[in-house]
Image (spheres, helix red, strand yellow):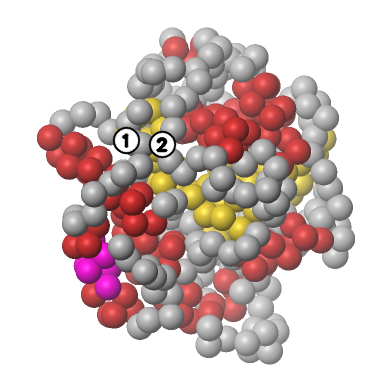
Amino acid sequence: MVADVTTSNLPHILRLTLHVLIIINMNLIIAVSTPLYKHDNIGTKSGQDIPSHTNRNTTLSMDFDRYSQLPTMRYEFAMPAAGYCGDELFLVIVVCSAVHNFEERQAIRDTWGYNSNDVRVVFLLGIEAPNQSNTIQHDDVIRESGVFHDIIQVNVYDNYSNLTHKSIAMLQWIQKYCHNVKHVLKTDDDMYIGRDVLLGDLRNTVHKRFIMGHLIAAAAPIRDPSSKWYTPKHIYPESMYPNYMSGTAYVISGDLVSDLVTSSSHRRLLWLEDVYITGICMLALDADHIYNAKFGYKPRIHDPCIYKLIITAHDVTPSQMYEIWDELKLRTDHDCRNTRISKGYS
């Protein structure tokens, strides 16, 4: 057993050494869990509101024809399950990750992704196409789950085209195991999260039934087949997407989760996860989009004063995660008194 795997207070070189020891220890652990394959401050009391109200046993792979059908899947999960969230929880942070991204997950655990009395952090993984290398990776994930107890794995192939399935699975997991949670943050493992800023905004908000994040409005589908975001007309014939939140990070209020699950079961799938979950599935719901400028989908300037003010920064490597975390401890609010979020993008 590893008694304490939190290393956020250690120098960077010692962290790396400890992580090697953790991996060695993980190889000695016999996993006993279920096998894993089976704009400033908008929307809070202290800021101005700009709501935009808008009215099983199968492993999945993506093709456009399948995405014209209704998502009738019920997903299978590994532990953690019942009892992980407890009765009263303010925030669950679900970090979408890939099987081989152990360094990214460990950097998050060591910095902003720690558990507390009212916050839980879990990592949502899919699976990879079976071969010898991936079998080894699967065993590593079982061992990792045995050490940290924060892994959820769902029966969906991990690729960009299946992100919608992973997010629907996330909603189903929350509905089943964390149904009393107040808020859910969905994010990715290359994101820095300003946890204290986020918690402050959520505790001050007066809204119910909302999705909060970086709002994208009046976006048109990309019809160029060479584009990563190509969407054929026969899949999505409309000329504009509904308003939606950037999929890099968004918060769903807990009172909206069940309705999103229901809505997703009645709407044809779209492979663009953020458009589908936070846009299309919101269309018929009595719920709001809450734009908050502290969310962003671009990389930020590497300035600890910027990171003291924001909720999200994109494209952050594990080494940068540690650097940001260590530098933040050395900066006071007085040091950063002249910093503005609007200057924070690289």
Identified by mark 2, the residue type is: Ala
- Determine the secondary structure under disc 1: loop
Residue 330 seen by the camera: yes
Residue 306: percent from left, percent from top: 59, 73
Secondary structure under the numbered disc 2 in the rendered image: loop
Q: Return the residue nearer the eye: 342 or 244.
A: 244
Whether pointer 1 and pointer 2 mark residues with C-beta atoms closer than 8 Å, the reply is yes
Q: Position of residue 251 (x, y in %)?
A: 66, 47
Which quarter of the figure has residue 334?
Answer: bottom right
* Residue at (39, 56) in percent of width and height: 148
Q: Which residue is mark 1?
A: 35
- From the viewer's perspective, tell me whether residue 192 is left or right of residue 209: left
Q: Nearer the viewer, residue 270 or 264?
A: 264
Compared to residue 335, the image places residue 13 above or below, namely above
Q: Position of residue 98 (x, y in %)?
A: 35, 44
Q: CA distance from mark 1 to mark 2?
A: 7 Å
Give me the residue at 81% from left, 61% from top: 204
In the image, residue 148 sits, relative to residue 13, either above or below, namely above
Magenta-highlighted residues: 18-23
Say whether residue 142 is magenta: no
Residue sitting at x 53%, y 87% = 330
Of 224 and 180, the residue lying toward us: 180
Q: In the image, residue 324 lies at what x, y percent? A: 47, 74
| Residue 19 located within the stretch drawn in magenta | yes
Q: Which residue appears at 48% of the width and 75% of the height?
A: 325
Q: Nearer the viewer, residue 225 or 279?
A: 279
Mark 1: give few (<14), some (14-19) or many (20+) Cα within 10 Å: some
**Would you say 255 lies left or right of 134 here?**
right
